[in-house]
Image (tube, coloured by chain):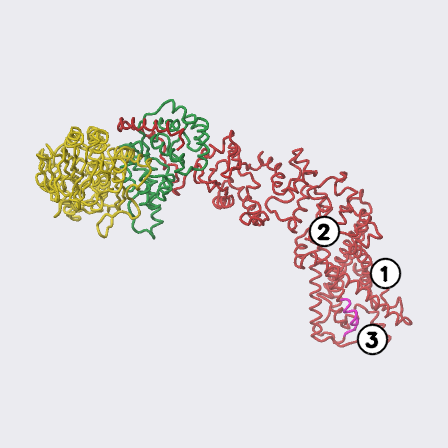
Chain colours: A red, B green, C yellow
Amino acid sequence: MPRRIAITGFVSLLAALLCTSIVPVAVATSTAPDEELMIDHFDPETGKRVIPNERCLTCHGDAQQQTDVRDDGTPVQIFVHSKEIEASVHGTQNCTSCHVTIDRVPHRKAPAVIVGCIECHRETWEQHKNDPDEKHARLKVVNEQIGSYMLSVHAQPNKLDQSRTNATCYDCHEGHNVGELGSIQRAEARLKNPEVCGRCHEAEFDEYRGSDHGKAVLEEKDSESAVCSDCHTTHDIASPETDKAKLAITKNCGDCHEEAQRTYFKSYHGQVHRLGYTDAAKCHDCHGGHSVKGEDDPTSEIHADNRLENCRNCHKDANENFLSFWPHGDAHDRENYPGLWAFRVFMEILIFSVMGFFWVHVILWLYREVMDRIQGKGFIEDLSQPDLVYFRRFPVVWRWIHFLFAIATMTLILTGTTLLFSHTAWAKAVVEFLGGIRMEGIIHRTAAIVWLGIFFAHLAIATSNIWRKRKTFEWFGSTSLVPNMKDLQDLKNMFKWFLGRGPRPEFSHWTYWQKFDYWAPFWGATVIGASGLILFMPDKTSLILPGWTFNIANLVHAEEALLAAIFLNSVHFFNVHFRPERFPMSTAIFTGVIPIDEFKHDHRLEYERLVASGELEKHLVQRPSRRVSLAASFITTVLIMTGLTLLTLVLFGLITLPS
Amino acid sequence: MENMKREKSIHKGVGHLLFAALALALPVAVAAGPSGQALSFTCAGCHGTDGSSVGPSMPAIAGMDPEVFVDAMQAYRQDERNATIMNRIAKAYTDEQLKEMAWFFASQRLRLFPQTYDAALAEQGARLHDEYCEKCHEKGGQPGDAGTLAGQWMPYLHFTMEDFLNGKRTWPRKMKRKVDAAIEASGDTAIPALVNYYGSQQ
Amino acid sequence: MTNLKRRTFIRAAGAAAALGTLGFPSLVLGAARRVVVVGGGVGGCTAAKYLRKLDPSIAVTLIESKPAYTSCFMSNEVLSGERTLQSLTFGYDGLRRHGIEVLQDTVVGIDPERRWIQTAGGRGFDYDACVVSPGIGFKWGAIEGYDEQVANEAIPHAWNAGPQTQLLRNQIESMPEGGHVIIVAPADPFKCPPGPYERASQIAHYCKHHKPRAKITILDAKDAFSKQALYIEGWTKLYGYGTDNSLIQWVGAAGGGAVEALDPSTRTLTGLVEEFQGDVVNIIPPQKAGAIAFAADLVDDGDWCPVDKRTFESSRHKGIYVLGDASSAATMPKSAYAANSQAKVAAAAIVAGFQGKAPDDPTFVNTCYSVVGEDFGISVAAVYRLNAETNTIESIPGSGGVSPANASPEIRKREVSYAHSWFKNVINDMME
């Protein structure tokens, strides 16, 4: 025993002993009867100690002694703003409701800070979710956020220390200072957000500090400017390397930069990105992520001097021509992008005029045939006495070419329009079904090569056919596909017939609409093929063409594809399959033959010519076998249904296209 | 009489508690054993009726914090606390019995008996207490999670402090720092001053 | 309704329900239960106080022949002059404050059939339960030549604190320097097993300061005694035990310590081997249960009262509870603390019986301090439980025991202060 206390200690001890032994049991005082008993400080149900908040604040609320010393001698901040807590959403909670490991005050051991936010919020919501009042309504959102958090990268075990998560609730939320919606605490928390994230993400925070966003938030206290959670979200945080995060970040940029995002999504980059091709240039690939700055700032990534470097991140061989690409080119912006605007106007006029003309043609034709049927006129196939004799119209090679062409075209439409309508759910579903945007790109390009291959193969065959018959080939003869004056005459007469002002014209081997169907792909192949190749090979193209060619190519590729998709799946289908005379379908292109009566009806002039020349017999064949008929019907049905589905998707995409 | 009635109503609460505890433990422990009250009654010969001691070396345990009670008894049982006789007695009880006794004493009202003290020392002790002790031994050392100091018998407090200072009892977390600081500030009189301050609260 | 009529009514009702049981809540009967306590010692006082504490509706009457209580424990300190007899004497007003009727009278008979108590003062009480705590009586004649008159006048036993204690103190004080004190200790069982040796210690403590050449001889009928090793440690340290100059000598039975006869005139004691002559002789005779226990037919073939160890209800007569030294509690020593502990068990059992409940499992504690000398206190402690199968009280294994050997002076010193605090608390718990 140290001597300094031994002496005095013992003296007073003896004094106390003496005094108390002289005074025997005298009057006792007991604690005031209305005072609580010790046992009242314990919960009668659980037997657990009830620790009032004031008890905690004795130490943790002492502004004079805000730090304490840990057992190992290191200082620790223990101060808690009681006023802050009282003003927070948790103001009425007991300290120990959250600090569940604290069962004794003073703590017997250094307490582990274990706060069980999630359980409590879940349980409280379970208890109150059916309450008539709205007092706990916000907990619904909280629980959704918890759900997101649980799936986020923050909830994953830390790689270095598996015993803890990467981040937990109170790493970001100041548990003592969670404000209600619209409160000052929340505004303050927003301004503090970058610093909170920066506690772990130091390098990112440093970059952010120098950015336009960072300056606005940190220096000007502008809570409108972007903080971390605006781009990265609050709870649904994924590693920025994941597609999910990349997509979310791009989307979140648009919450403020709406116009830039709209034009970006119109661009090829934006389209494929939106469908999940996250390697395509995104906002932060060009603008810099955390270090985003205006284009006038020489340190900005989008400053004219630095831009090419940006392009080369993906396009390794990008040359100066890339710089004239309009990443946010807007075909509706006549002022800034007049060339693009002009192309759009041209293409749209083309689409509207072609479609307008043919849809009028379709409607009138339908009207006429329906009217004829009502009047008991017109060509009606006698199904009770099917033709036994058929006219052979297409040799096998053309039938194959048409089949492959149809398949390739439909594939191109499907895969291409997903980009055009990347805003739709079906586009995303299709991409996913096909195995992702990269796979879709491969399919599209493969189909394009097949398509072009067929196109050129057909050219070759046709050319060789003509070459073989060069002596006798009549360029404007009845079996030629070359348009002639009679076609114009037929068109005029068809309209007369439609309107009931004349008889149905009689046609030769090819009608004018069949010739249109044949020649239209020549235009299409040129426009779509050329633009497609440009888009296919940007680096090669840029060797000779300026960057804005891509903008134009992207535009016309899409517009022309749209035209083809709508035309083929509506007008072509009507002309061949859906007009009442043919309804529900014609399988001629797959069987290669049509009933002789139908041939007589649709190609009267040719029939008569063949009869006159005695050549008819050469073209007559027997009715196709039942198996062939069924197979042809099946293939046709599938293709028609597919075509109609594509038409529906395209029209849906068009209608829902954001303005 | 008045007290007795109050205690009865409190015993009821404790009774419920014990009943719940027993109900839970029932499949295992069929024999109930002595009640917490019966166990606690046996302490009175040394610690006074219901724990309000009249003998100055025997600490009052009425109104004692139940967890402090259990801690102390367990420490005695493990021979971890400097004892004369309590270690021998504590070895007779199970944890469950200690808990029941703890609830019993926590349900009692502490009766304090006058003891002589040095007013000047007590005044000095009051200042020291506020500076170094109040945060843990709140409200002047009222019964609580840090034990019962206010009104506690002074000889007992002296024994306790001797044990702490002689290394015969493990300091509670942070207490050594505070006591050292108090002795640093007031020298030899620090401990007697504090003891007289607690003894002065009657 | 007179008491007797009420009693008759209870009988009738009781017989109708279940003969001999007390299974009626007071509420049903609409009248208070009455408990009569015979004996105002530790057992009786504690039982009276705790009966009221457990159920304030019970009417408790305590009958004691003496006007005040003088404690035997700590009375050896009177012999050393450390304390006065007065400091051991306490009135019964504390019990009266608890609503207990304290009557100074002597019980001469108990009728367990009628549940009726008769006093020498001519009063009679009927009871629902009776507590008998008479303490000890002495077996006169065990030592030839030693009887009650000799004890009162010349050779005190001083084994019930009172005038004989003062007489013995006076004899020691007036004994010449170099005088010889003889203490005759009985065979087991007897009240306060460490008492004779504390007595020797306290007398030695006095002699060390006032008559350093005196001798104290303990003539013991046993070969071993309570806290023996600790006493010898203390005697060695304080009184030179084991040396030629030792203040204390102990002669065990094997050494011829058993005493057969006394010659009061010469204060000569006849042992089996030799004779001993002392200047002051203190004979602690063999003991038995107090007189009323015999009068009430509570004693079995031996000297003590057999009881049900769960409740301390007499094995011989229902409704009578025998506490303390008089009861036969075997493993528990005949000590104040044991009586205090037994009284609470009995009180709880009586209250449970009144409420129609089965008695709880009992629990007992004994602690006993002895002050060997200056700054040298020692203790024994034990916690007991009931072994219901054998109706025995057993010490809980691993617990209890005596103070450690060779403890630090600090511990020995503390045990002195604890002894004094213990005294205050026992007194307080039994009568305040």
Look at mark 3 in the image and give the residue it sits on. Answer: A616
Q: Tell me which segment is drawn in magenta.
A: A390-402
Q: What element carries label 2?
A: loop
**Mark 2 vs 3, N-terminal side:** 2
Closer mark to the observer between disc 2 and disc 3: 2
Residue situated in front as seen by the camera: C177 or A550: C177
**Kind of element beneath mark 1:** helix
Amino acid under disc 2: Ala
Q: What residue type is labelled 1?
A: Leu
- The answer to which quarter of the image holds residue B151 is top left
* Mark 1 / mark 3, whichever is N-terminal: 1
Q: Which mark is residue A280?
A: 2
Q: Are marks 1 and 3 in contact (CB under 8 Å)?
A: no
User: B57 or C300: which is nearer to us?
Assistant: B57
**How far across and how far down the image is residue A371, in percent?**
74, 61
Q: What residue type is labelled 3?
A: Leu
Q: Are marks 1 and 3 on the same chain?
A: yes
Which residue is label 1 attached to?
A488
Mark 2 Cα shell of 10 Å, populated few (<14), some (14-19), many (≥20): some
